[in-house]
Structures are given as C-alpha cells and as structure tokens.
Amino acid sequence: MDLRQLRYFLAIAQEGQVTAAAKLLNMEQPPLSRQLKMIEDELGVTLFDRSGRRLKLTPAGELLRQRAERLLQQYNETIKEVQELDEGVQGVLSIGAVVSCVSLLPPAIKKFRENYPQVMFKIHEGDHFLLGDQLEKRNIELVVARLPFEANFDTQHYSILPLPSDPFVAIVPSHWEQYAGETFITPEELARHPFLTLKTDQTTGMHERVMSEFRSHGVLPSIICECSSVVIIIALVASGLGATILPKSVMASSLFNNVRMLDMEQANFQSDVGIVWLKERYLSRSARNFIDSFTE
C-alpha cells in the first residue's frame, strides 16, 4: 500500500461513496473500486460497511483513516521542510490571535516583513477554544494569546513562549468628570461603579484574575455585563454604561475614543501573554522566524 492508495481510501471515507470519491479524485469509478479491493485484500480486513446507502467505516477502517491522515500530514510537512532548506522563505503564514493581543502583532509583522517580504499573512481571530481547534486542524501554525491558554487540550499539548507581561488598567468613560486629570484609581473606588468584564462561558482566566485582585482588597464590583468582545466592551464603556479592566496593550490602538485609561493604584497584577503552538507539529521556517521577531 502506497501514499496514492491512502489518498484514494481517504477520499472514499470522506465522500461515503466510491462514485463521489472518484469524481473528487478526477478518475473513473471502476479503477477506484479495484484499488479499494486491493487495499482490503492486502490488509486482510474489511474497511467499509457496505450495508447502507453510504459506506461507513468499520473499526479497522476508522483506525486506518486516523493513521493515514497523520502519515500524509507528516509526508507533506517533510516535503515542505526539505524544500525550505534550499528555497527562499515565501508563501502564506497562517496565525491566530485573541482580540486583546491584536496590538502586539503590527510591530512583529513589520519587523518580520523587513526580512521576508514575500510571505503573506492570514490572521484568524477568536477565543482560546476556537483557536485551539484551528491549531489542532492545522489551519493555523501558532497563536498569540493571553495565558493560561484555555483550549480543549492539556497545556502539555502545547509549546508556549512567554512574552513580556502586560499591566492591567482601568477603562472609564471620558465624560465621567470626577476622573478628569486623574491618572490612577484604586480597586475599592472602581468597585463602586457598574462593571463590565471580558469573559465567555469557556474562557474565564482573565476574568478570574481580575476578580481575585478585587477580592484581595476586600471588595467585589457589581457586574452588569459579561462579554467576549473587547471592542464591544469598550464601546459600552464609552457610552457611559460602566467601567472595566483590560490589559494596557489593548488600548494602544487609536480606534478607541471617548474612554479614559487609569492605572491601578495599590494594585500590582499583570496579564501574561505568550505564543502557542502544537508540540508535535512541524513549524514552517516562516513560523519559526515570526516567533523570533517577538524576541529579537
């Protein structure tokens, strides 16, 4: 059995019909049926249950599907790695970033493109679970995210390069006159205002860190909104609905108007940031060079 036959098998498993798989592979149906029979004869097992209208994988077929996908992935990555030894770095680099880390990308991308102008970026935005899933599916190579990385897998599944920590700051409406000219606010004072928090049902790490800081001062804010979008939270704050706490780098963008940033007095807590990738996956030269652009 060779790689060509593994591709045939995977096409049939994907389509559930030999005819549809043959169309996908741009070949005739009878030769594909013969190839499937050759594979089953060689292995001495039945790979598909043929009793229904669609072909369904047997337990042996499901095991082969998993192994075949992994083998073809390793084969493609090996070819790419070998080619990159002699070729200039080019092509597409697909990465992910949580919204609160977007401001960290421009300087890194700018530095990277000074040395590798032929590489095009594809940037995916989402929460930890979505981006972890994209990593697992090999749709992206790495993620810039707040830590801990709260995805579906144990942290041992990932390699993580920590980046410099980012202090938390309070964000209040600019028209709240009591803070005109102020540069600091205490947790106790902030807790007296309606509070908006960055949180989803699955990613709670940043929210818990902020609440822990409030508890250490003997107070808890009155939360009126939980939201997964940094942009929406800042828009709500700008409207005067309440206040929030976010990593300072989030406010580096000039897009956010009508809000005021205040440092946290008597509080010393940071937002940890890192670059995350799969331990078991080969990283392209472009991905490795991009990681280096954060550390040089």
Image: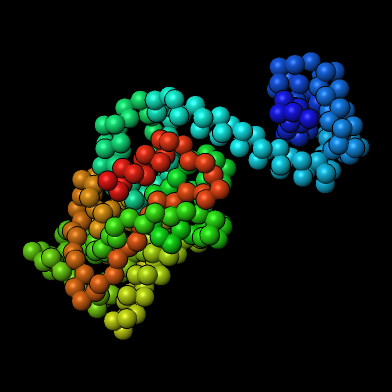
Location of residue 87 (image quadrant):
top left
Report how many numbered discs are placed on residues in the image.
0
Residue 137 position (above or below residue 118): below
**Residue nearest the viewer, comparing 104 with 111:** 111
- Across and down, in percent, residue 100 comes to 34, 53
Task: Decide if residue 289 is on the left or right side of residue 152.
Answer: left
Location of residue 281 (image quadrant):
top right
Residue 44 position (above or below residue 190): above
Residue drawn at 31 percent across, 84 percent down: 218
Coloured how? rainbow
Residue 151 position (above or below residue 195): above
Residue drawn at 43 percent across, 55 percent down: 160
- Across and down, in percent, residue 199 comes to 42, 61
**Residue nearest the viewer, comparing 42 with 65:** 42
The answer to whether residue 131 is seen in the rendering is: yes
- Residue that lies at the very extreme toward the bottom in this rendered image: 218
The answer to whether residue 189 is seen in the rendering is: no
Task: Decide if residue 80 is on the left or right side of residue 109.
Answer: right
- Across and down, in percent, residue 224 comes to 37, 67
Which quarter of the rendered picture does the N terminus lie within? top right
Residue drawn at 13 percent across, 65 percent down: 183
- Across and down, in percent, residue 84 comes to 46, 29
Task: Decide if residue 196 is on the left or right side of residue 64.
Answer: left
**Residue nearest the viewer, comparing 13 with 173:** 13
Residue drawn at 15 percent across, 69 percent down: 184
Task: Decide if residue 259 is on the left or right side of residue 148.
Answer: left
